[in-house]
Amino acid sequence: MSVSEKLDQVSEKKFFSFSRPYLDFIDKSKIYGLIYFVMAVINLIIPFVILYQVIDSGIFRYLEAKFIFAFILSWIVVVFACWVGFQLWWNRRKRVVELGTTEFSATMIFSEILQTSGEWLGTLIGIIGAGAGLFAFIFLGNDLNEIFRMIGMRSLALGPAVIIAGPIIGFVIIILFRFLAEQLRLFASLVEHTREIAKNVKR
């Protein structure tokens, strides 16, 4: 028996192969589907984390009724936005697993994650900016920025302009991330076509 065969036998023992399920898990690209699963679950948790933090702060005891109504309606908008985000990540996870069987799978999967992240972020900003901004403006007028501070989105504290600016910012984010993702796909496609041309030339 050769040294190579002996090493193969040793490597088949449990001590040297206990990590094989983990390695198979990575090779089959299921780990990328796990990322989508985790992000989908996070979207379900976010609204309740916001609600807990606001209630735990005890701020309701010092707020006028109009602030409370504005927060409740804005929180419902956050729930809706996160539900859309959940569906986005949940439905895209199957596509990532399929991409794991393609050539240059890591590049293709990263581009898909990048695109989905941009669509998710842009969607949340667009829906929450317009929806929560509108409800907050109806109840609070120019004090609507307080609602965005309460829900942890200080970057959207733009005053009444957020009702229009939110969807515009969200749309720009979606386009930008999709553009970057397409550049990665284009790079992978060019490399693949170059390889095919090189093979045909050799023939």
Image (cartoon, rainbow, N blue to C red):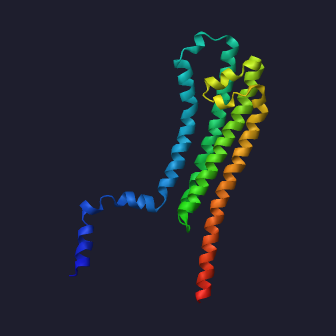
Judge by depth and name the residue closer to the eye, 108 or 44. Answer: 108
Assign the C terminus to one quadrant of the image: bottom right
Query: Which residue is painted at 73% across and 40% down in the image?
Result: 169
Extreme residue toward the bottom, this view: 203
- Residue 49: percent from left, percent from top: 54, 29
Instruction: Find residue 144 and report its image quarter.
Output: top right
Nearer to me, 36 or 184: 184
Report the number of numbered marks.
Answer: 0
**Considering depth in this image, is 169 or 5 the residue closer to the camera?**
169
Is residue 72 left or right of 2 when viewed as pictured? right
Q: Residue at x 66, y 55 (%)?
A: 180
Determine whether 9 is above or below 65 in the image.
below
Query: What residue is drawn where x is 58% and y is 88%?
Result: 202
Residue 98 visible in the picture: no
Q: Residue at x 27, y 62 (%)?
A: 16
x then y, percent, for residue 197: 63, 81
Determine whether 199 is above or below 189 in the image: below
Q: Measured along the vertical axis of the image, is residue 57 above or below residue 201? A: above
Q: Position of residue 75 (x, y in %)?
A: 64, 26
Eyeballing the image, is 94 above or below 141? below
x, y percent for residue 138:
77, 20
> Is residue 73 in view from this perspective?
yes
**Which quarter of the image is occupied by the N terminus?**
bottom left
Residue 52 vs residue 142: left or right? left
